[in-house]
Image (cartoon, rainbow, N blue to C red):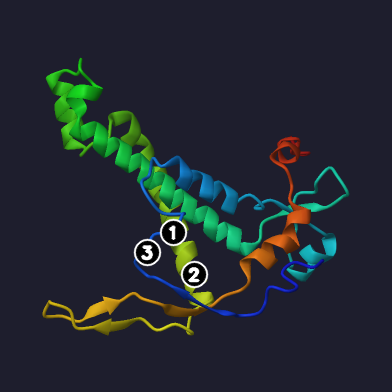
Amino acid sequence: MSIAKHASGYPRTTQELYNSSKYAGHPLDPNVDEAWRLLLRPMDIRVTAAELARNNRTSVQLPRDRGYLAWLGVFHELHCLTGLKFAYKIMQKLLRQWKYKEQYFPNMTSAQAYDMDSHTGMMPTTTRNMSRTYEILDHCLDRIRATIICHPDIASLTTFFWGSGTKPTVDGTKTLHSCVDWDVLMDSIMGRAVSSEEVDTLVNPSL
């Protein structure tokens, strides 16, 4: 079956803007991590040389069936979002360690405590890596920005109502969206899924 052969329809669905989904929640909630793991499970897929040619691309050849390793574009965007989520978890952990530093670091000297305070919870070993982290996050944000511009949602309207304040309040109830059938899309690519074990066997032929 071709990728997304039957997923190109746009059924109208409703979403509650302020309701949390299973992909949101406390950064240390294992159920949230598991939901994201399952969402990204068919990220690595097998494509043919003809499919690469239609996209004017080349890729790494897989050891089985002479296919090629690829991601659908949507999984790059989801991958970037997981990067942002991971950074959020790190910041939450560091801020908690800073707030309760006497419990986390009972033997900390006053000089070390000052250094930790001056970095707003970021330990010195972490701050050295922050520059690279920010570069990755900037890429992820720009990737999401580019995707939003390329595929603008023009089916839904964000509306407002008068609440108790002096400014209009966003009405987040039942906004309409035109969406592909995600389950059908996943069914169409599951047969192409490449296991992590197979990816691990790849060896750069030029080294």
The residue identified by callout 2 is 146
Q: Looking at the picture, does residue 107 appear above or below residue 129?
A: above
Q: Which residue is mark 1?
A: 21
Residue at horizontal 52 percent and vertical 49 percent from the top: 35
Q: Which quadrant, please, contains the N terminus?
A: bottom right
Q: Nearer the viewer, residue 50 or 12?
A: 12
The image position of residue 144, as x and y in percent, is 47, 64
Residue position marked by numbered label 3 in the rendering: 19
- Which of these two is toward me, 207 or 117? 117
Left or right of 205, for residue 179: left
Which quadrant holds residue 73? bottom right
How far apart, in angstroms, are the residues tagged by discs 3 and 1? 7 Å
Label 2 CA crowd tier, 10 Å (few <14, some 14–19, many 20+): few
Q: Are dots 3 and 1 in contact, CB under 8 Å?
A: yes
| x and y, in percent, of residue 99 in the image | 19, 34
Q: Is residue 27 left or right of residue 95?
A: right
Count residues near mark 1 (Cα–Cα under 10 Å), then give few for <14, some for 14-19, many for 20+.
few
Q: Is residue 112 left or right of residue 32?
A: left
State the CA–CA distance, disc 3 to disc 2: 26 Å
Quadrant location of the C terminus?
A: top right
- Find numbered disc 2 in the image and state the secondary structure of the residue it sits on: helix
- Cα–Cα gap, marks 1 and 2: 24 Å
Q: Quadrant of residue 125 in the image?
A: top left
